[in-house]
Amino acid sequence: MPSPPPDWVKALKPSGPQGSELLQQERAQSNVDVERLSELLHTKENLERRASLLALLQPEKVFDKSQNHTLGRVERLQRSLAKAKRLQQLAEEHKWSMQELHAANDLIGEPTPYGLHASMFLVTLREQGTPEQHKLFLERAEKYEIIGCYAQTELGHGSNVRGLETTATWNSNDKTFTINSPTLTASKWWIGSLGRTANHAVVMAQLFIDGKNYGPHPFVVQVRDLETHLPLDNVYVGDIGPKFGYNTMDNGFLLFNNVKVPHVNMLARFCQVDKETNQYAKPAMPSLVFGTMTWVRANIVLDAGGVLARGVTIATRYCAVRRQFQDRDADPHAGETQVLNYKMVQVRLLPLLASMYALHFTGRGMMRLYDENQSRMKAASSPDQESRGAGPEQLRAGANLLADLHATSCGLKALASTTAGEGLEICRRACGGHGYSSYSGIGPAYADYLPTLTWEGDNYMLTQQVARYLLKSARAVLAGKPARNDTSQILQAYLDRRDKGASFDVLDEDKDIVAAFGWRTAHLTFEALKHRDAEQRSWNSLLVDFWRLSTAHSQYLMVKNFYEAVSSPELSGALDPETKGLMHQLFRLFSLHTLEREAAEFFSSGAVTVRQITLTRTTAVLKLLDDIRPHAVRLVDAWAIPDWHLDSSLGRYDGKVYEDLFRRASEENPVNDLVFDPYPWNSALLKNEPAKSKL
Amino acid sequence: MPSPPPDWVKALKPSGPQGSELLQQERAQSNVDVERLSELLHTKENLERRASLLALLQPEKVFDKSQNHTLGRVERLQRSLAKAKRLQQLAEEHKWSMQELHAANDLIGEPTPYGLHASMFLVTLREQGTPEQHKLFLERAEKYEIIGCYAQTELGHGSNVRGLETTATWNSNDKTFTINSPTLTASKWWIGSLGRTANHAVVMAQLFIDGKNYGPHPFVVQVRDLETHLPLDNVYVGDIGPKFGYNTMDNGFLLFNNVKVPHVNMLARFCQVDKETNQYAKPAMPSLVFGTMTWVRANIVLDAGGVLARGVTIATRYCAVRRQFQDRDADPHAGETQVLNYKMVQVRLLPLLASMYALHFTGRGMMRLYDENQSRMKAASSPDQESRGAGPEQLRAGANLLADLHATSCGLKALASTTAGEGLEICRRACGGHGYSSYSGIGPAYADYLPTLTWEGDNYMLTQQVARYLLKSARAVLAGKPARNDTSQILQAYLDRRDKGASFDVLDEDKDIVAAFGWRTAHLTFEALKHRDAEQRSWNSLLVDFWRLSTAHSQYLMVKNFYEAVSSPELSGALDPETKGLMHQLFRLFSLHTLEREAAEFFSSGAVTVRQITLTRTTAVLKLLDDIRPHAVRLVDAWAIPDWHLDSSLGRYDGKVYEDLFRRASEENPVNDLVFDPYPWNSALLKNEPAKSKL
């Protein structure tokens, strides 16, 4: 590392007012009770857990973050494996729960090569393995005696599981399966933790018995030697190369040349090949599995709020510290204005501040519904269910609601991850030039987050599923057989009032905002239904309409969840009236800003008038920006993201932005060890000697 | 590098149909004359020049691109300097023009540490130096005897030049200037080529004479020793650290502790301090300088087309090769569908295809106007101007048009760079999972391009200038004193017809599309004027309206330029009727897709009816997508970007996507040299030995 700056440099301070003073002013001008709001968002227990993890991790040298943006991929991957190992050692030493390991991994701020072992490999073995297979694979995997991954995606096939080319052929003679890659495009690809780390894989392959294809099934296959760590014979495996982000993960490829595995290696809890009869058998799926996808998606929605909060925290604090130009109407002798005071900055940042709360409450709402339903189902399957009051009627009602959420949750996953991904980039640009520095902390987070827009279902593909469900629901409503759930209610409400027209008072009534969003969904649904059923238009020609429909419905669900959260007794009990009022303002900003951006649909559906939209834009949204502005810093403080987690010069809690940018550039930047001979005729081209005496 | 794959892997092919066959089919189904279209876009001369440069550069090992995405920043920077030096050697050897050097730099595909020397340093010395200073600095700089940069931006001050803190104080006693950095925020920051390379800088500093501040002026200051390459005394200089992209450039910081430079080091063509009287003197700006900014912005607009073309070429070819799912309405026995056939993909990619043509023709149009005006001005200042027919009247008219373009060009810069930057990300996502691989070639181009959205004026800040000009023009029109230019014409046309209303036939008449865009600009201008002048609203409260206004007007200018280009005799003469027809379709797609996205403004301005917007969306745009789809591959082929320049597995001209992804991952990826011991209890944590025998 370069030598520290000379004394005359050390004596320099940023010109005043200092960032620390400006953030103090920001915090002094608002009464938001940061601590209570933090506890409402994260619970006291989680906050305390994170604090103690932070105290444990931050001092360890192996978790140092200072070179993350400078090193090449080989070194980054090596260091990340070291971090993963150390985390696992700490987890054993301190007997961490899965939640604690997850929280610790979140704090160190990068995916590691253990990522897919600790998640999909263990989960798949647990959920799809028999007790015999648990003993054989799961127990060893949990002790890290074998390290695994989940190998589904192939070079030529992403989202379409039915198109997978890898085969698993049942050999009735020796009771084995032959795993094979018949083409180059059959190569497994993008498989996390496989590139260099895993010695086992759960491989999804087309099961063939006696020439007949039974579709994709999961097989446990060893791919590397447990001692030498080299690939086994007839296995070709490696890392797929550098990526836009996620470079601390060894995403891998994998090809098989007719590799045999024993009968027990097909995960057999739900489907098996009978060893004796050579017949395929598929027992019914147990009802508890139903809803897992909903739970995964609820987590993506909740995480999206947290990811966005990271960008908004950085940008809001920095825009309160950064001053640029004078307000044109201000006293010419006044100093430069805090960037956060400009309406063009507020209109980009504050709706994202509202969005991160909206995503959080929506994710929480989805989880609550899921949990309630799970316990209802459990109660129903226990012998004394009658006495607990969970009758079959209630049970059906709960299942109905969950089925509704399940069908619509893919739209929410798409909207949430797109909002967070694109929101981070908006935050980065709102930081001006310094946003482009890796020390901003936003770019790296953005690059690592982007895959979420593609995995667990590509965001564009997913919207078709929501549309299909909405069309089906609309047909049922028209046939007079509506399901008992929220979707059917908004469709029915629209039909009932369509002729009378809507007259939602979105500017004054919060409930009417929710209703207007529901109206728009219903309008777009019946429009799409007309195109498909009456006009017989092709599915392909309607994909754009379906995408708009899914987005509209997902926005409705967020608005509804946000509204329910801010109106809940839980929130009223937890917060003082002023902070509670601000939560309502955030709800209104999120909703009205969305309404204004999608004005054409709200207008053409008749949900609101052009006059209302104009007033929303020119008056209501601007007023909300004014009202929320003084509280912006405290509202991001409440998210309570530790500085070490943010890893951002711009977003520091103490506002010492310029000092930290300068410190990192001059003290943590290995480029400053180089001495360049800059002349083109020098045939040696490069000199590369450390210059310790002078920077 | 890892050992090559075993024979059984080498024998594998992608499953059919092959990418090469699919691209052949694509090219067979269209008659677009790729060669003639290429020549129209780039000129035959430029295409030939690029071909010979490519033949020269590609074989040289120093320009190898295979490790670009894998190396750490130190090595990337070292290699990039080596590339820059080699380019300079070749430039001298082959006596390249500036254009040729620029084209060669473009082909190697990364910014180099010579970047700011070769552009801003030389340009500033040339334009702002006196003949004496040319001899002293420029001649040596042109011979690379001194290497320089342009140091304007500071740690605490980006866009606002008047806020710069670095001072240059005139010492009348010894006829020198003292350059000083009074605070930490005065540190120069983001200065390209300064971090490790430059030994000189043009430093923008506040000029103080006798205690009075005369504003920012340029000073040549030596910062490093010409032999040892170490910083001079009282100069603290270094690299600012890793960035989201642009990591092959050494953006630097720079602080001065009262460093003295002689009188001759203040660039004095336009302003000087008189050595004898110690007085400040500022001669009038010569009129030829007027318009330079317009020329810079025209280049940004033109480049934006080229940058976007890179992404669109990659995504279009890959979406023609990639097949995923079946069309829901298709024969169930049909194979998977080319992704490019899905409307949801077409609606994202084809409007961008149209945009890259729109940007290109707009940039060309701006340059033509600039060039015409420059020659008119030259003719006017030559003694025989009367005989050439360039009378004062015509001269004023030309200057008027250029003044109009000058004022509105900042809006075009903002719209063009935003379109290209965001368009690249849309292209990346349209490539699905593989878009995230660095081998897609899109991510790296995106990351390197993003600064363009911030430099030469932050895109959001710039929009205020356009709005200010439009308000001023509107006031002049209302006062009955319109300037003679296009902006005044659309404002006047709106006033003349406002009461009668517009009835633009956007679905059938191309000219009416242009008029509808002009109408919208005029409507938004008079709305904003009402808010500012009649309602006396604050400038800050109108910033969002101004941004919308600037965007609207810039879209109008693009639509207008695109329309003029496709209607021009030049284009008719160069292209066969079918290709010419396609250019018209692209114009319509660009315009109508924009109109539909901004529907609320078009509707509320009365430019079109709701019915027209609905038809645009549900019929016209879908029809255009159908019409353009078969020609998509040839339309990107015409852009003629060489494979070596694209550096993309997905965008290869021959369609061998999967073979190339696999080749790079298995043969060019140093991660596959590593052997990991994956167990957490291994206290050595890491093994790192090459495994040549097996991958």
Image (cartoon, coloured by chain):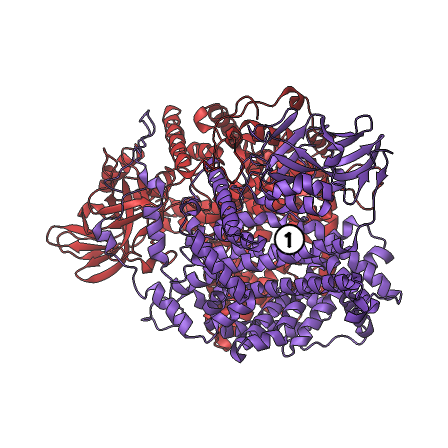
Chain colours: A purple, B red
Q: Nearer the viewer, residue B77 or A55?
A: A55
- The chain containing the residue under callout 1 comes to B
B393 lies left or right of A564: left
- In what quadrant of the picture does the C terminus of chain A appear? top left
- The residue shown at (82%, 34%) is A275
Image height of A153 relative to B396, above or below: above
Q: Is residue A50 visible?
A: yes
- In what quadrant of the picture does the N terminus of chain A appear? top left
- The residue shown at (60%, 23%) is B5
Residue B57: x and y in percent read 47, 26
Q: Nearer the viewer, residue B650 or A198?
A: A198
Residue A669: x and y in percent read 36, 44
Q: Quadrant of residue A509?
A: bottom right
Pick out the residue farthest to the right: A479
Q: Quadrant of residue A533?
A: bottom right
Local secondary structure at mark 1: helix
User: Label 1 sits on what residue type?
Assistant: Ser
- The residue shown at (55%, 66%) is A43
Residue A566: x and y in percent read 61, 73
Which residue is denoted by mark 1 in the rendering? Answer: B591
Q: Nearer the viewer, residue A69 or A608?
A: A69
Q: Nearer the viewer, residue B110 or A251?
A: A251
B377 lies left or right of A547: left
Pick out the residue farthest to the left: B173
Q: Is residue B396 visible?
A: no
Image height of A244 relative to B534, above or below: above
Q: Quadrant of residue B209?
A: bottom left
Give the class, few, some or many, for how many residues have Cα within 10 Å of label 1's Cα (few <14, many ≥20).
many
B434 lies left or right of B505: left
Residue B383: x and y in percent read 34, 44
